[in-house]
Image: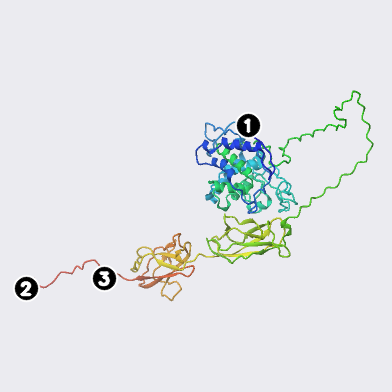
Amino acid sequence: MAAHFGRRLRKGAATTAVAAAAVAALSASQAPGATGGEDHGRQAAAGASTPLPDPGVDGTATGNSRYYTDLPPLDSPAPAPSPSPSGDGTPVVQGDADAGIPATVLAAYKKAETELRAAKPGCNLPWQLLAAIGKVESGQARGGRVDANGTTLGRILGPQLDGNGFALIADTDHGVYDGNSTYDQAVGPMQFIPSTWAWAGRDGNGDGKADPNNVYDAALAAGHYLCRNDWDLSHDTGLHSAILSYNNSQDYLNLVLNWMRYYGKGTHSVPDGTGSLPSHPSDDGPRTSAPGTPPTPPKHPSAPHHGKPGDTGQSPHPKPPAPAPPTTPTPPAPPTTPTPPATPSATVDHLADAGTAKLTATAGDAFGAHIATRAETATGTAVGKVRVRFTITGDTDATFAGGESVATIATDAKGVATAPELRAGEKTGDFKITTAVVGHKAKGVNYTATVTARAADTVARTDDTPQTCTPGGEFAGQIQVKATYKGAVADKVAATATLVGAAADTTANDKGPYFKDADGKPVRTLTGLLTDDKGLLTLPKLYADDTAGTYLLRVTLTGGATLTVELKVAPADPSTDPTPDPSAGSSTDPSPGTPAGS
């Protein structure tokens, strides 16, 4: 089996020379030049020059918590000569334990990829990225120790984020997910912190709940998290930004890219619970033992030596030790709950609006104004570096940029947090955006946003062919109109078509031209019509009953645009009948020069 490199490093500490050499060796051995193709192998080398984003902009999925630094083998997994027995197109490798992914965990990654391909096709999420993060975060759910539904057998928890070697994140979930009501801890196989899971959590196995301890839920949530902000993971820029948003560390980025490339060259499924376990956490804290592993007994230190310099401390006639005087045991001090240190969030008394303009947008468009909220103390002093959560509520399909309904943004030096761009959906009406300080109870401020229907201010026919018909016949062709709004195409605008008897009449006529419904019965009002993406609307064919006359078709669109088309129902004009008259050309007069009566 290929050699493994292991290393330990504390967050924020300088990488050791040995660890740096290991990463360099692995990256060099898997350099993009080895394949010559445009694949994710390029990122393994490119990651070293990627600038780190400001961790305060949108937080991270894990709170920059502990992860495993075990590197993939230098040798790539060797593909088996036969295709995958599962028929899913996954290359099969044999003989390399690191290439084996527990069956349920692997299924969860692939299921998440499939769902993201449909929900966010522009993201181009590969399941190998989820596998790489899952390997680094939890060793593929501790080697695949999950039940039949994909839920881990026991919780997988990171260290408490108390500011001691890690970020300082006071409790945000009252211990619901991590069992810690003082500080937050990363939870589950993909190691989400509770405040991130609160908005990023997904139901990946269809049981009606989002559980960070379920590998299907966690994998789908990780996919959506990595695909936010319209990142395209098929390109280095989007891929690196997404990984760094998961854990803001250059070492983490390089490590995930190496595992992603390794899995891209071949994997195989192993039974749940038999996957290989990592052993090198990124901090200097105690390593998590595999379940069932007995603890290592502590070594007994040698007795201290108090002899003279140069004395070996060995006596040819050692004296027996004097008996120690009896002592009264001191009762242990009662355990105390650690008090979290003061944080900027704890000083926030309330959130206030920071000059947000009126929030109104047409369906399908972006809101012109951004929501800006300021964190303030009781005396009105701005508080910086505080995370503010914006949540869209109500019956709406509006989202923030990237398709999410929740966004967490840190306040700047002026105490202001500006939410991402807000995009209107197709549902019209009002909805609310609520705000809250993450990790601290403070009075928030709510915003009301309004989505108006798509509109048109002009509508016209695409041709000027007269609309005529004989009684009981049908009109030739179909009427087509085009709608615009301020000169631009007005797409998906609702329209109504009504057949009336006069220009001043707004009610549908009971005679004359008509449309047909699905059963072939006469209909003189059509509702629920929509213009297409080019602003065009083609009406169904028109028919006429036996009543001759002049009628009107009125087309009305949301926004006030109206068009009236004249329809004539009249018998055919004999003067235009091309059929020859049988009597034409005959005469009873005698031919010239012919005697009468002859």
Identify which amino acid the numbered label 2 is placed on: Gly
Question: What residue does disc 1 label?
Answer: 3
Visual colour scheme:
rainbow
Residue 370: x and y in percent read 59, 62
Q: Quadrant of residue 342?
A: bottom right
Question: What residue does disc 2 label?
Answer: 597
**Which is more N-terminal, label 1 or label 3?**
1
**Above or below for 75 versus 551:** above
Q: CA distance from mark 2 to mark 1?
A: 131 Å
Question: What residue does disc 3 label?
Answer: 574
**Which is more N-terminal, label 2 or label 3?**
3
Disc number lying in front (3 or 1): 1
In front here: 41 or 553?
41
Residue 561: x and y in percent read 45, 69
Disc number lying in front (2 or 1): 1
Identify which amino acid the numbered label 3 is placed on: Pro
Disc number lying in front (3 or 2): 3
Q: CA distance from mark 3 to mark 1?
A: 99 Å
Q: Quadrant of residue 441?
A: bottom right
